[in-house]
Amino acid sequence: MNYSFNIKKILLLIIILFQSSCSKQDSIDGELITVELEELNIDFPTMKINTNGREIVDEPKVMADLSVIENNNQSNFKIGIEIRGSSSQSFPKKSYGFETKNSSYTQDKDYSIGGFPSEEDWILYGPYTDKSLIRNKLVFDLSNSIGFKASNTKFYNLFINDRNNGLYILMEKIKRDVNRVNISPFDQNSDEGGFIVKIDKPTGEGASCNTCYNESFSFRSNYDTKGSISDESEIYFIYHYPKPIEINENQKKYIISTINNFETILAEDNFDFSENPNYLNFIDIDSFVDFFIINELTKNIDGYRLSTFLHKDSSGKLKMGPIWDFNLAFGNANYCQGNKATGWGYKFNSICSGDVWQVPFWWDRLMESEYFKNKLKNRWVELRQVKLSNITINNLIDSHVKYLSNNDVINENFINWPIIGKWIWPNSFIGNTHDEEITYLKQWIDRRLNWLDQHMGFL
């Protein structure tokens, strides 16, 4: 790839490389290199976080100062920040969640960051195992382009206490908001209202293990992965809105009954009766179709079974989304055939029957429905014309890579995190350069699109 350096930057990078090579610590787990922002002199959106000597931990949030520098302007914020994620917490490069605060740190306060609508809750995702650096942003951009709402995202260089953490992606945290998940608030005095739940590991506030089930923040499906009644289902729904600490028992009963009614209809023998399936009374079919397409396009190894959000407005139907967490998608996982560009992603259970986290039976049932399959086929054929064409996706990849490389961001990220050419869990491909990582990504997507055209387009 062609990087343009000025003399000052070349000298600086030589110094950084020399410092890195002299480190006593292993390069993958090595300490971040201290570089003053002014020394880099790059025209690229940048965030600087100063914790005033405090260590950022999983929880609680620590109070810090945030400066956002872009377009020759600097905006300053008070924030509370913590490490976030599940398996990603084991990576040296952490991801973070933060809330914007008032001047005294005593209350959350909405602000616009990155040109996005004002809010208080934000995510700084640090791509690590994804050495293309762009998988999450690519999928979110594609989802928004087809009208399936996803969080807005934006690239930033991140400095914490003057240490260069490399490339990060600012993301809107999923929450109830007119500009995020636009559902009506759940009235504390009512049994009904809008809600958001997430299919995920039953962990949460107060949980100390990945498999601890706690009814205060989650509930089980009434059905196993084959659609049979079960008191010990492996499918868990986590209360996302209202928050577990705020939800009351009546609201829980309403949410549980909504999910249970939908699943009960799908489990019936005549769920696909006539040309007007019974399940259409419960779900927004278009959202289920688009969710399926995004997850199958990417063959997201976590798709359908983890980080899977659903929401419902007070008077509406159950909808899939917003989408979340695609760092292991596009062939970036070496287990459960995640590297293969062929095969259905929703068939995960038959491929990895021993995995603890399984896909709900819904998708097997829906794929027995001629109505659903026809909707899916027609939508796929429509999207393949332009919005999900090979050319469109490749051009979007090229656009992101060009933007990052023109600003030397890719090179600087891998100077700070020297993992190119090394296996990082759960990579299925190890490129010796970032170019090779991008080539693999493009070729995998081309193979995937070809397979889906042969199968999704002829359901």
Image (cartoon, helix red, strand yellow):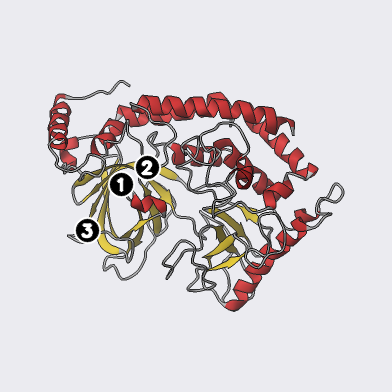
Q: Mark 3 = which residue?
A: 51
Give the mark nearest the N terminus, 3 or 2. Answer: 3
Residue 165 versus residue 60 in the image, above or below: above
Instruction: Tell me if mark 2 has few (under 14), some (14-19) or many (20+) residues whose alpha carbon lies within 10 angstroms of its own.
Output: many
Q: Is residue 418 left or right of residue 232?
A: left
Q: CA distance from mark 1 to mark 3?
A: 17 Å
Give the mark nearest the N terminus, 1 or 2. Answer: 1
Which amino acid type is shown beneath numbered disc 2? Answer: Pro
Q: Mark 2 = which residue?
A: 127
Which amino acid type is shown beneath numbered disc 3? Answer: Thr
List x then y, in percent, for residue 104.
26, 68
Residue depicted at x 53% and y 57%: 200
Toward the viewer: 387 or 229?
229
List x then y, in percent, for residue 278.
80, 55
Q: CA distance from mark 3 to mark 2?
A: 22 Å
Q: Secondary structure at mark 1?
A: loop
Q: Which mark is residue 93?
A: 1
Which amino acid type is shown beneath numbered disc 1? Answer: Lys
Quadrant in which the N terminus is drawn: top left
Instruction: Give the number of the mark in front: 3 or 2.
Output: 2
Residue depicted at x 57% and y 62%: 237
Q: Is residue 367 left or right of residue 355?
A: right
Residue depicted at x 31% and y 59%: 81
List x then y, in percent, for residue 373.
74, 40
Give the mark nearest the N terminus, 1 or 3. Answer: 3
List x then y, in percent, for residue 177.
51, 59
